[in-house]
Image (tube, grey):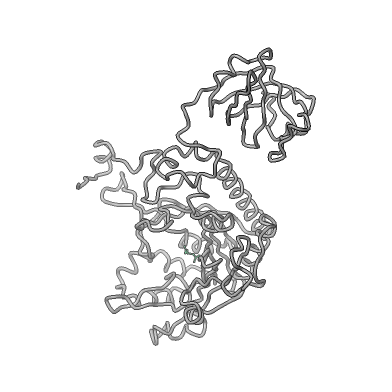
Amino acid sequence: MQRTSILETKDLVGQEVTLCGWIHNRRDHGKLIFIDLRDRSGIVQIVFTPKGAGYDLANQLRSEWVVCIKGKVNPRPEKMFNDEIPTGRIEIEPTDLEVFNKSETPPFPIDTDGYEIGEESRMKYRYVDLRRQRLAKNLAIRHTMAMFIRNWLSDKGFLEVETPILTKSTPEGARDFVVPSRLYPGQFFALPQSPQQYKQLLMVAGVEKYFQLARCFRDEDTRGDRQPEFTQLDMEMSFVEREDVMQLNEGLLIEMVQKIYPQKRIQKIPFPRISYKEAMEKYQTDRPDMRNDNPLADGDLNLLAFCWVVDFPFFEKTQEGGFTFTHNPFSAPKPEDMENLMNKKNIAGILTTQYDIVLNGWEIGGGSIRNHQSEALEKVFEIMGFEKERIEQNFGHMLTAFKNGAPPHGGIAWGFDRLIALLNNEPNIREVMAFPKTGDARDLMMKSPSELEEKQLKELHLKTVK
Ligand code: ASP
């Protein structure tokens, strides 16, 4: 089919075109039928006249029917210009109309921004919801950002490497989603909370510069706008220090914003850095919103205040009186605190190499330099009170890997959905994901989660208890 995209029609006055898309709306004016036809590129007006082609069929058209219209691009009379849309100075005189598919009455309007519609309905009919301009734009800009990041990192010598989705359950902070093994009764895979261990193993493998737009899974109680699965821009590098990772990421963020969001202004370059201690004292949070320091920032939707937070304590006390990690068990302490880690001395005072990147009061990423020597990593688990056996069971593979030529390395991960939501002034990450779960962690469109058939349960050696 020689199809023309709707946006192109604005430059094709006098020509015959074939347009395919959805009926955005229909207005009848006396005997004339005006159709707004929509495809991904935009909207154009079609005018059916009683004597022209397709008039009787046009009378039956309803919103969201899918059609093909052949016609001639005519200039509009000047007094009919509509400069609110790019095709507002032309209209189409149809020569043929074919209906590809009818549609039920749409469950909700799609010519609004959609915030006014209940989430249940939007998620159940997400494929209709995604047709609205705001969401179509969010998907497109998400793609643009992903492409920018991929090209930018690729130019700097990074390889995108896919890591497994079926992996191993390890105590890493959040609860794991698990997948029962059919072949090994009573055994389970886990979905990755992040590719943390695999990316470190890629460093042992000599990849040196890794990134991935990686899906992460965390079975946490949904609160606020958390999602059970989300996307990270995940990175890891060998032979680097904290400064290298921070510089690289700052450069990427600045260039990406300047290229893709030229209307935005970054409050301060280089990004301010603040220690955890100072942040807590001055802002009572480790995610300070630095816009508050700027008297001109009031209500400015286009102001971006990035900052780095560093020098976090490595460990915090648990309720049981032991210690657990604050961020990431694989982090190295600050070099000056390594001796205390190895001797398990002044544990509460040990600082980690962790760096968090914060934007307008939201944590959008974090990472660290890692412990690449197995003895140091082992000490972390000992401080957390893990027995030798448990360390071996959960993390033996990492300790072994580190005894097989592990380079010094470090990395970071960005919350990709969160960053896109912030840059597009969206209230939550569901607005920038194609098929998110609802706030209470269900997929209303697919009706998931759902029960399994008895036969499947049996194959998986599972019994459910209600
Ligand atoms: N894996 C860490 C996380 O998901 C990020 C990192 O340290 O690279 O938070």
Spot the residue most to the top: 51
Q: Is residue 151 visible?
A: yes
Residue at position x 62%, y 59% from top?
A: 158
Name of the residue lying farthest toward the front: 30
Residue in the foreground of this view, choosing between 269 and 49: 49
- Across and down, in percent, residue 166 comes to 40, 51
Q: Give the residue furthest to the left.
A: 465
Q: Quadrant of residue 220?
A: bottom left
Identify the residue at horizontal 45%, vertical 47% (top origin).
436
From the top left corner, tell me how far across and down residue 66 is, in percent: 56, 26
In the visual, does 112 lie left or right of 384? right
The foreground one among 411 and 254 is 254
Q: Can residue 369 be seen? A: no
Decide if residue 9 is on the left or right side of residue 316. Answer: right
Q: Residue at x 37, y 46 (%)?
A: 442
Q: Is residue 332 above or below residue 39?
A: below
Q: Nearer the viewer, residue 411 or 316?
A: 316
Residue 277 appears left or right of 45: left
Q: Residue at x 74, y 34 (%)?
A: 81
Residue 221 at what x, y percent from top left? 34, 57
Q: Name the quadrant of the N terminus.
A: top right
- Of residues 101 and 48, the one drawn nearer to the viewer in this rendering: 48
| Depicted 146 relative to depicted 396: above or below | above
Residue 388 in picture, x, y percent from top left? 31, 72
What is the tally of numbered marks visible in this picture?
0
